[in-house]
Structures are given as C-alpha cells and as structure tokens.
Amino acid sequence: MRIINKKPVLFEKSNHNIWTDPYIQQQILKKHLDFQSDEASRRQESVLKIVNFVLKHSKPKSHLLDLGCGPGLYTSLFADANYIVTGIDFNKSSIEYAKRKRNGINYILNDYINDYPNGKYDTITMIYCDMGTHSDSDRDRLLNNIYHSLTNGGTFIFDVFSERIISDRRENKNWEYAPQGGFWDEKEYLLLSQTFHYPKNKVFAYQHNLLLEGTIKHFIIWERYYSEKEITDILEKVGFRKITIYRDLLGKNNFTSSSEIFIVAEK
Ligand SMILES: C[S@@+](CC[C@H](N)C(=O)[O-])C[C@H]1O[C@@H](n2cnc3c(N)ncnc32)[C@H](O)[C@@H]1O
C-alpha cells in the first residue's frame, strides 16, 4: 500500500480501472445520463449531431456495432432509425441500464480489446475519443479486428483528439478531500491527482492515488491524441482505402476539449 508519485511508464496499466470499478461505474452512469453536460457522454445536442453524421455516412438500416456503447444513448437512436444494432461495453451498470431502456438491441457485456465480438457489420462506431484511451499496440489489435469484421464497403466512424488538445492541458498536481465520499468512493477519501505529458508519443496520463481508510487505489487514464496525417497513415496500414477527416462537427465542449476530429474510414 503505497502512494505512487512517479511518471508512469508509457501505457502502464494501473491496478484499478474507473470503467470497471463497481462503485465508480455507477457514478459514471449518472454522468452519462446528464444530458446538459459533456462528462462521460456528450450533451444531447451533440449526440443528435453525431447520430445524424453516422446516418449520413453509413448504409441505411444496416448492421451496426457500437464499441464502448455506454448506456446506449447512440445505439437506441440507431435502432430508432431501423439499423440492426449491437453494442458492447464492459461497464456493467451502463449495459444493464441500456438493456432496461430499450428492447431489440443486442447488448454484450465484455471487453472489446480482449474479446472482440463475432459477426460482420456494415458500420462500426466508437464515440467520444475512446480510441485514445488505449495503448498503441491495443489500438492496432483493435483496428485489425474492426477491419476484418466490416463488410466490403463498410465504414468505421470514430473520433480522436487532435494536436490542438495541447492548448487545453498542462502538466499539474491536484488534490481533493471528500469527507462524506463522492465520485471516487462512497466513504471519506483523499484523491491525489497528477497530469503528465509525453509529447513525443502524443499522450497525456492522468494518474490518481485514491487514499481510503486502510488502502490506496491507483488509477491511470491514458489519452492519446493524433495529427491528421498520423491517424490516416495508421488506418491505411490496416487496409482502409478511403479515409475522410471532419473538423468542427460540434460546438464547444464543456468538459474535455473541443479539439476532436471525426474520421470516416471505408473498407
Ligand atoms: C467516454 S465513454 C463513451 C460512451 C459512449 N460511446 C457515449 O459516448 O455515450 C467510453 C466507454 O467505453 C467503454 N470502454 C472503454 N474501454 C473498453 C473496453 N476495452 N471494452 C469495452 N468497453 C470499453 C467504457 O466503459 C465507457 O462506457
């Protein structure tokens, strides 16, 4: 039981994960369902813009897979547009909520990196810069699986942070004392947080030491950003033949950064 106070090795995994921690995932679900905020999911106005964007860049009423679907804010709208929808996420609270909310969607509670779903899809989506949370090797493994599970002419639609994110981020240290508990735990805690930048690798790390009575939990969240050329080259290497980048699809984000780019990659 130790406080970790050093810059993590690039893409090092922490012993706890915010998405799968049983208490934190319930707090995240509440944030997903706040339609005015950009925490966890984007606010409703942006969700609707992204849904329209996906409908415009995919074969109508086709098979769609949403990777990291959360509580199904997007999957339910795709199903409303008569797509045949599968959603996968490893946040149990979110998947249970999504299943309760709407019938007729195939929801899978699993890890899409280590247990990529079977089947062929005409459209695959991955929304809210989730690609950037994975190491370069996990990303490449995932992109290969995505490519092989797409039908010919199918599209992979996702977003990543561009290099402009640098202007919104600084290396820093922070702390939060929650005497009655809060987002990170239901009981009293002290949270020690650090932001690190790896400019050569285009990565930020958010490291958190959560001090609870008798224990310390350690979390690292990775955020990889991309130049337009780099993400295009990566997708071409996997085999995608037509890659189009869209900037400024959304308005100002009130939680993370407004520097995302959307990518439509065609097989
Ligand atoms: C930022 S949230 C976005 C959720 C949803 N796409 C949205 O915009 O409303 C990222 C989601 O990806 C899920 N996720 C992250 N890594 C995952 C993995 N390896 N396997 C399955 N789900 C994952 C998280 O649990 C979380 O629900």
Image (spheres, rainbow, N blue to C red):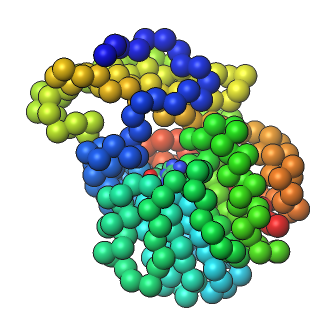
In this image, 124 relative to 92: left or right?
A: right
Q: What residue appears at the point 77 percent right and 64 percent down from the top-left corner?
A: 148
- Is 65 on the left-hand or right-hand side of 211? right
Residue sitting at x 83%, y 43% = 229
- Residue 161 in view in this figure: no
Name the side, left or right, on which 200 lies relative to 267: left
Name which quarter of the figure residue 122 lies in: bottom right
| Left/right of residue 149 with respect to residue 128 in the rendered view | right
Q: Does residue 82 lie above or below 224 as drawn? A: below
Relative to 240, is 256 above or below?
above
Residue appearing at x 59%, y 20% in the figure: 9
State which quarter of the image contains the N terminus. top left
Q: Is residue 16 above or below residue 45?
A: above
Q: Position of residue 129 (x, y in %)?
A: 57, 49
* Relative image position of residue 38 (x, y in whole percent): 42, 51
Whether residue 154 is visible, yes or no, is yes
Residue at 14% in and 28% down: 188
Q: Quadrant of residue 241?
A: bottom right
Q: Position of residue 139 (x, y in %)?
A: 68, 45
In the image, residue 92 above or below residue 178 = below
For this orientation, the residue located farthest to the left is 180
Question: Looking at the figure, which quarter contains the C terminus?
Answer: bottom right
- Name the spot of residue 55 as percent of width and height, x first: 63, 77
Q: How many marks?
A: 0
Q: Nearer the viewer, residue 148 or 43?
A: 148
